[in-house]
Image (cartoon, helix red, strand yellow):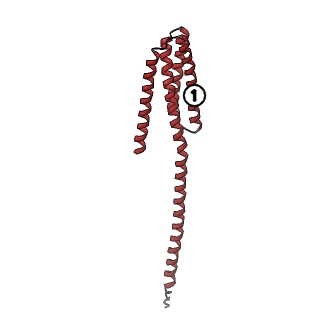
Amino acid sequence: MRWLSSCLARRFSLLLLVFLASCSLLLLSACVRGADDVSLKVAEAEGKVKEAYAAVLEAESFGANVTNVVSGLNAVAVLLGDANVAFRLGDYGNASLLVDRCIGLADAVVAEAGNLKSEALARPNALLLAAGLSGAGLAVLFFVGLFGWRFVRSRYVRRVLKMKPEEAVSS
């Protein structure tokens, strides 16, 4: 239960951080309208998208389930494509807004991929613990069964040795 509340708190703080970053980038984008500035932002967004792809690939290589993150990665790629189209058409204001959204979402994807990677790294430790406890339980069961059998067998042998043979009655 405690793990669940900490996980929810992390996700809420991550979403809050992404929201605040998006808001600040939207306000900043109102000031940036020149072609050179937008061109630099598009290049920065391309770098962030590459970083997000690398983070997702790395998390997947550690065995994390990245199916939910891939949808966010696809959204980042669509935003970057739309930003490039707007930039080439000369719509620098829209391109700047799209690039800002792309960068914010790419940062969120990188953070989520990092969380998934750390969860995937912790999973083998839990499996080793479960395997160790199962092995110890089997060993205890074996020894209890062995000593229990010896006890029952020795008791049975004593009872058989105390028995007296019955004499047969002849007619």
In the rendered image, the residue lying farthest to the top is 90
Q: Is residue 75 visible?
A: no
Q: Could you say which is closer to the camera, residue 163 or residue 129?
A: 129
Q: Is residue 76 above or below residue 128?
A: above
Q: Is residue 52 left or right of residue 13?
A: right
Provide residue 20's location: percent of width, then percent of height: 42, 26
- Residue type of the residue flagged with mark 1: Glu
User: Residue 165: x and y, percent?
Assistant: 50, 86
Element type where label 1 sits in the image: helix
Q: Nearer the viewer, residue 135 or 96?
A: 96
| Residue drawn where x is 41% and y is 37% of the image | 9
Q: Which residue occupies 53% across, 59% down? A: 136
The residue labelled by disc 1 is 51
Q: Is residue 23 visible?
A: yes
Q: Position of residue 84 (x, y in %)?
A: 55, 15
Q: How many marks?
A: 1
Mark 1 packing: few (<14 Cα in 10 Å), some, or many (20+)?
Answer: some
Whether residue 55 sits left or right of residue 23 in the image: it is: right
Q: Quadrant of the N terminus?
A: top left
Position of residue 169 relative to residue 87, above or below, is: below
Q: Residue at x 43, y 36 (%)?
A: 10
Q: Nearer the viewer, residue 25 or 128?
A: 25
Q: Residue 47 occupies which quadrant of the picture?
A: top right
Q: Residue at x 53, y 35 (%)?
A: 114
The image shows residue 162 at horizontal and vertical percentages of: 49, 85
